[in-house]
Image (cartoon, helix red, strand yellow):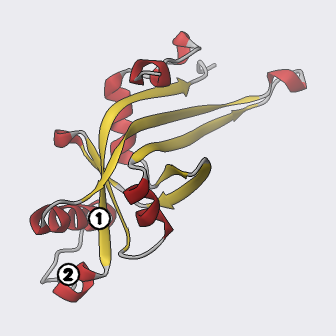
Amino acid sequence: MSVEDWTRIRRKDRAMPEEGIRALLVRAPYGFTATSVDDQPFLHSSLFWFDEANRRIYFHTAAEGRTRANLLRNPRVCFSVAEMGRLLPADTALEFSNEYAGAVVFGRARLAETEDEKRRALQALLDKYFPDLRPGVDYRPITEKEMAITSVIAIEIDGWSGKQKQAKQA
């Protein structure tokens, strides 16, 4: 199968355009990374940063643990974010629904390659979730010891798709 096969949306009327996928990846508060080792799937939820300029997703995990070990054995991953909108009641149970937006990313995960890449990604994560706080002013910057016990994972994006449903306003 190709990336085009993985990212094909059945409901074309709900396909999210690329700019919508990018915007969702910027604003989503957390994401889920799926890994697979020996035909056993695993799911890892985490805070993340979407490096829009380099079309890359970053998250961190422990220097030792299942997520890192899985990625080193099989770098192919799937990453997903979603958000829910309004609940949509209806006259019949079958027609109950909700508004939503979701994106699925396919790619290959790797460890951050350089100390600079690792620091940049970790600082970007802090900046995303704590935009009003500054290192060296509001908190002590990341130390070498902390860097040594943290794995920074980069997902190189091969392809993505997004799906959304928004009800017409009455």
Side of 15 relative to 108 (left or right): right
Q: Which residue is mark 1?
A: 152
Amino acid marked by disc 1: Val
Front residue of 105/82: it is: 105
Percent across and percent down for residue 143 are 18, 86
Q: Which residue is mark 2?
A: 142
Side of 119 relative to 154 (left or right): left
Q: Does residue 61 sit above or below 2 in this rendering?
A: below
Q: Residue at x 37, y 46 (%)?
A: 27
Percent across and percent down for residue 51 are 23, 47
Depth-wise, is mark 1 or mark 2 nearer the camera?
1
Side of 74 relative to 129 (left or right): right
SS at badge 1: strand
The furthest residue to the right: 92
- Can the viewer see residue 64? yes
Disc 1 and disc 2: Cα gap in Å? 13 Å
Q: Quadrant of the C terminus?
A: top right
Going from the N terminus, do you reach mark 1 or mark 2 first? Answer: 2
Q: Residue at x 23, y 79 (%)?
A: 147
Q: Does residue 146 sit above or below 66 in this rendering?
A: below
Percent across and percent down for residue 11 are 58, 14
Q: Around disc 2, counting alpha carbons within 10 Å, would you say few (fewer than 14), some (14 to 19), or many (20 or more)?
A: few
